[in-house]
Image: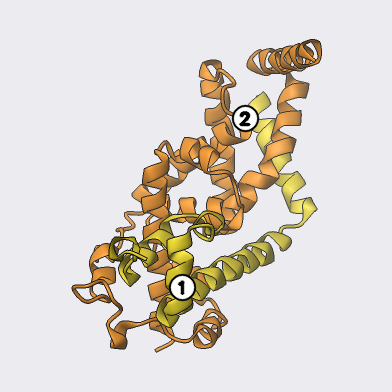
Chain colours: A yellow, B orange
């Protein structure tokens, strides 16, 4: 493998945080880097954990919204709009 | 095939025309269809319930004010989220919330040496410790709250709601490259924030 194809940690971090995981996971030079660099592997895990924990937070917030409350909000809006 | 598609497009146009004429039944139908999604997105962006309710109401008022200019090129939902983004920015400006001044790019640069390798003392903490930190009560919401609205919205739409890149770009009126920059900043700020709190 030629030197210019090797990505630095900094470049890999930039790619992993700007692109979708589904995209960068297909890049050979990123995968190769992750294979040899445990720091960047940790970084990749951090990004994954962030995603899943934010999803959990979001569903715990939205699960609290009951239908009754939503119907009330909708009703108010509809009345306001049709005035 | 073209007959079917043509028929569907016609139906969509009729619907839009009736909506533009402010047919009360159609209006109510559209409000019922999208309010839940908008309201939940506001909560996800960290607005408290009372603000979320006002925001959604304002989105609808504006929506019917500007509906005549809607050509149906993007979906109604994308159009509504674009309005939500503008309304939320206005509200945040009124509250004079200042964006974090410390530049995330600069902070990230400090983690690497001149060859772009991690400096050992700045390298990522163990994923177990990182995960543990995310479990601290309220920390996730606190870290999200530190982000400027455009980064927050980009992150929530992409990672939490898993919307398509194309749609998110329309909502925020940015190019795909700009969206990449927003996500880069958001993810790194959040990661730093969570990592910092674990120390």
On the image, the x and y values in percent for residue B108 come to 29, 70
Identify the residue shown where x is 34% and y is 66%. A6
Identify the residue shown where x is 55% and y is 50%. B157
Question: Which residue is label 2 attached to?
Answer: B76
Q: Which mark is residue B19?
A: none
Q: Is residue A43 above or below residue B51?
A: below
Identify the residue shown where x is 56% and y is 21%. B67
| Element type at mark 1 | helix
The mark closer to the camera, 1 or 2, is 1
On the image, the x and y values in percent for residue B42 come to 56, 52
Toward the viewer: B30 or B79?
Answer: B79
Q: CA distance from mark 1 to mark 2?
A: 41 Å
Give the chain letter at badge 2: B
On the image, the x and y values in percent for residue B50 come to 57, 54
Give the chain letter at badge 1: A
Toward the viewer: B17 or A6?
Answer: A6
| Element type at mark 2 | helix
Q: Quadrant of the N terminus of chain B?
A: top right
Identify the residue shown where x is 42% and y is 71%. A33
Instruction: Using the rendered view, name the quadrant where residue B199 is placed.
Output: bottom left
Question: Which residue is label 1 attached to?
Answer: A34
Toward the viewer: A32 or B77?
Answer: A32
On the image, the x and y values in percent for residue A13 come to 38, 67
């Amino acid at each position: 493998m030629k030197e210019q194809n090797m990505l630095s940690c900094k470049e890999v971090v930039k790619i992993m945080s700007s692109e979708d995981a589904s995209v960068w996971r297909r890049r050979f030079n990123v995968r190769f880097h992750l294979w040899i660099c445990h720091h960047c592997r940790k970084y990749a895990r951090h990004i994954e954990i962030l995603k899943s924990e934010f999803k959990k937070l979001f569903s715990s917030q939205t699960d609290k919204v009951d239908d009754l409350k939503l119907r009330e909000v909708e009703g108010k809006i509809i009345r306001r709009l049709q005035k | 095939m073209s007959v079917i598609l043509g028929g569907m497009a016609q139906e969509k146009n009729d619907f839009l025309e009736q909506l533009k004429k402010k047919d009360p039944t159609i209006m109510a139908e559209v409000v019922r269809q999208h309010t839940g999604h908008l309201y939940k997105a506001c909560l996800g962006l960290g607005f408290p319930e009372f603000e979320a309710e006002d925001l959604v109401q304002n989105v609808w008022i504006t929506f019917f004010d500007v509906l005549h200019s809607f050509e149906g090129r993007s979906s109604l939902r994308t159009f509504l989220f674009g309005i939500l983004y503008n309304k939320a920015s206005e509200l945040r400006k009124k509250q004079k919330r200042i964006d974090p001044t410390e530049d995330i790019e600069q902070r990230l640069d400090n983690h690497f040496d001149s060859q772009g390798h991690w400096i050992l003392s700045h390298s990522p903490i163990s994923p177990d410790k990182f995960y543990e930190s995310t479990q601290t009560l309220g920390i996730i919401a606190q870290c999200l709250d530190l982000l400027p609205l455009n980064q927050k919205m980009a992150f929530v739409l992409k990672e939490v709601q898993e919307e398509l890149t194309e749609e998110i770009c329309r909502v925020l009126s940015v190019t795909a490259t700009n969206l990449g920059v927003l996500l880069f900043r958001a993810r790194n700020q959040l990661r730093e924030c969570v990592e910092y709190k674990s120390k």
